[in-house]
Image (cartoon, coloured by chain):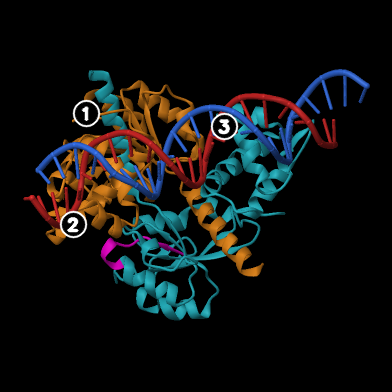
Chain colours: A orange, B cyan, C red, D blue
Amino acid sequence: MIQKEISSAVIERLPRYYRYLDELLEEGVERISSAELSRRMSVTASQIRQDLNHFGGFGQQGYGYNVQSLYNEIGKILGLDRAQNMVIVGGGRLGQALANYVRFEKRGFRVIGIFDRNPNLVGMWVRQCQIQYVGQLADFLKSHEVEIAALTIPRDEAEEVARLLVDNGIRAIWNFAHVDLNLLFPEDIVIENVHLSESLMRLSCKLNRERWQADG
Amino acid sequence: MIQKEISSAVIERLPRYYRYLDELLEEGVERISSAELSRRMSVTASQIRQDLNHFGGFGQQGYGYNVQSLYNEIGKILGLDRAQNMVIVGGGRLGQALANYVRFEKRGFRVIGIFDRNPNLVGMWVRQCQIQYVGQLADFLKSHEVEIAALTIPRDEAEEVARLLVDNGIRAIWNFAHVDLNLLFPEDIVIENVHLSESLMRLSCKLNRERWQADG
DNA sequence: TAGATTGTTAATCGATTAACAATC
DNA sequence: TAGATTGTTAATCGATTAACAATC
């Protein structure tokens, strides 16, 4: 598997390919051409071929792509071919929602700890985990192999906790707090921001523009 | 306010500007130059000026931008200058998390109904709403003015419910289910997808590439 | 072999950045 | 007026699409 420098535009799209391939597998489809996949996903066949070729020839001329092996290959690129431990910091509803999300487990993500600073939440069972006091987080990270942390706490606390996480070996932060953590850490710490309120604003913005266009 | 055709790349960035302007207001900053803002946000000053100019001259030569008025203007573009009602379909933890999220209210989004098909959840209070049975959704939409619906239900049910929503006047769907609803509806229905599992895969993908680069 | 479909190069399109004249 | 900083045009860069030769 040759990896050229892959643009983030391609990385953005990979999980979506993966999802469609998963659906194809469920349907029992064995092979698919870029043209057929392009119809389903409504992107150009050209783009599909370009994207997949970044990783070396997954396809075969005159045949197309084998769904199962393409699925496996993309899974490897996404790092889904191994179990990955994860902690969740912030045991509120959002943290609980993430912990309960069964599908993550199917992808190899395993929540091994949930932490909160609120004593009312500490001790509560969420799926297979009991919420622990956040003061125990550092020790926990030292004694467990975890690279990924989800951060579902308020903005004000996020930076401090993020530093603690990184200082204790966390390599990737799935950040739901409204701070741009990426500006605070060196490049080799992976940050994926999910800013829900910004997403809602985009929705509202598009809706607003619709109204505009309808008016004028 | 002149509105040229605005690229989605710009719309993507607007909420982030809005957030930074909000922070500046909290700090009591009255004016800011594109250069200074560019430092804070770590984007180019050029991009900021280009972006803001899509909407007509918010700035003033030799002075910069007035934080308060720029904040207000962007707020208008984002449609935050008026109250917007919203229903949540799916009363699980994720739906509850969204309903509880206070900050949305600050932005004018008001959750006026939560629905679920699970009888165990029906009747439960979440913030100011009591979860209702999903069978009552259509009637509710007919008798209330709502344009926005958040969809936090499993993939399999999403399409059917989305059709019901659209048939009953919903104009914008904030979609957390793992389906591309945008492929199913005409262009004037606004869809904003939040695919959390894909977000986590991107995180994992970047982490995976880090490891690669470290190795070889 | 003929047909299908990829891999890959070249052309186009759009978005970002640089530069500078306009103007507060 | 002089200095600062925008608005805006032009240049660059990157990503998407089109086209077609390679090959299964």
Callout 3: chain:
B
Asked whether residue A124 is in view, the answer is no
Q: Residue B17: x percent and y percent? A: 59, 41
Measuring 42% from the left and 79% from the top, which residue is drawn there?
Answer: B138
**Could you say whether the residue bearing mark 1 is in a helix, strand or loop?**
loop
User: Where is the C terminus of chain B found, in terms of image quarters?
Assistant: top left
Q: Nearer the viewer, residue B139 or B205?
A: B205
Callout 2: chain:
A
Q: Are marks 2 and 3 in contact (CB under 8 Å)?
A: no
In this rendering, the label closer to the viewer, 2 or 3:
2
Compared to residue B120, the image places residue B35 above or below, namely above
Q: Which residue is mark 2?
A: A24
- Residue B61 falls left or right of residue B49: right
Magenta span of residues: B149-157
Amino acid carrying label 2: it is Leu
Q: Residue B150: x percent and y percent? A: 43, 62
The answer to whether marks 2 and 1 sit on the same chain is yes
Amino acid carrying label 1: it is Ile
- Residue B18 falls left or right of residue B58: left
**Could you say whether the residue bearing mark 3 is in a helix, strand or loop?**
helix
Compared to residue A97, the image places residue B147 above or below, namely below
Q: Are marks 3 and 1 in contact (CB under 8 Å)?
A: no
Q: Which residue is mark 3?
A: B41
Q: Quadrant of residue A3?
A: top left
Amino acid carrying label 3: it is Met
